[in-house]
Image (tube, helix red, strand yellow):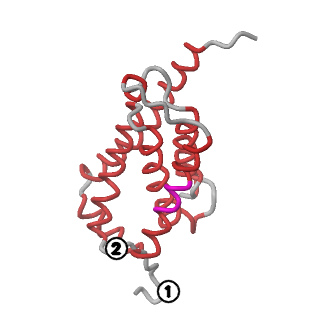
């Protein structure tokens, strides 16, 4: 079997575009659908103050998604992506089980894992990182993207997440 570097670069470009644009559009949808409503929903889920977290989530989704799609500072973009998906999975989907057909955490897990995989391989030749001669990839950058994203999510959840109690608090 002959290794085709051009095919790998094209595959990484397509994966980055799909995964990155999906996240960026999700962030844009938070604004287009009414960020105040998103903030109220975040409050009801236990992320306080909800409006602040709505802006942080939307901004991170737009920024990390666009940066990942462009292949810009890829492991750091992936780390932000993993972080926002970890929070979404814990706060909004965990209680529903695994499968997305029941609003479970399957989808956010796959997106976060894809971002971490891109950080591991690097963004490929068709990227801003390559144009700037940034070659961050491999196991250390998997640890940065996955570990840093999950770690940041844990810190955010520990400091700002207060799940509602059964009596509605």
Q: Quadrant of the C terminus?
A: bottom left
SS type, badge 1: loop
Q: Position of residue 150 (x, y in %)?
A: 53, 59
Identify the residue shown where x is 60% and y is 37%: 138
> Dot 2, crowdedness within 10 Å: few (<14), some or many (≥20)?
many
Front in this rendered view, residue 146 or 59: 146
Please tell me whether residue 49 is drawn above or below residue 169 in the rendered image: above
Looking at the image, residue 41 sits to the left or right of residue 85; the answer is left
- The spot of residue 18 in percent (x, y) is 46, 32
Residue 125 picture location, percent across and down: 47, 20
Question: For the residue labelled by badge 2, is the local secondary structure a helix, a strand or a loop?
Answer: helix
Left or right relative to 61: residue 165: right
Q: Nearer the viewer, mark 1 or mark 2?
A: 2
Question: Is 116 positioned to the left or the right of 30 in the image?
Answer: right
For label 2, the residue is 43
Residues marked 1 and 2 touching at CB (< 8 Å)? no
The magenta segment is 147-152
59 lies above or below 2: below
Residue at 57% over, 58% down: 104
* Mark 1 → mark 2, Cα distance in angstroms: 15 Å
Pointer 1: what residue? 166
């Amino acid at each position: 079997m002959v290794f085709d570097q051009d095919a790998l670069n094209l595959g990484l470009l397509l994966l980055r575009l799909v995964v990155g644009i999906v996240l960026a559009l999700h962030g844009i949808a938070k604004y287009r659908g009414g960020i105040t409503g998103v903030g109220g929903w975040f409050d009801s889920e236990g992320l306080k103050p909800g409006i602040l977290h709505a802006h942080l989530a939307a901004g991170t989704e737009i920024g990390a998604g666009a940066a990942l799609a462009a292949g810009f500072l890829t492991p750091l973009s992936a780390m932000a992506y993993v972080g926002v998906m970890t929070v979404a999975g814990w706060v909004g989907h965990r209680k529903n089980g695994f499968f997305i057909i029941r609003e479970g955490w399957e989808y956010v897990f796959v997106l976060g894992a894809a971002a971490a995989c891109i950080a591991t391989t690097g963004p490929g030749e068709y990227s801003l990182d390559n144009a700037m001669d940034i070659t961050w990839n491999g196991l250390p950058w998997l640890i940065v993207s996955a570990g840093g994203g999950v770690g940041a999510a844990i810190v955010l959840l520990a400091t700002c997440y207060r799940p509602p109690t059964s009596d509605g608090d």
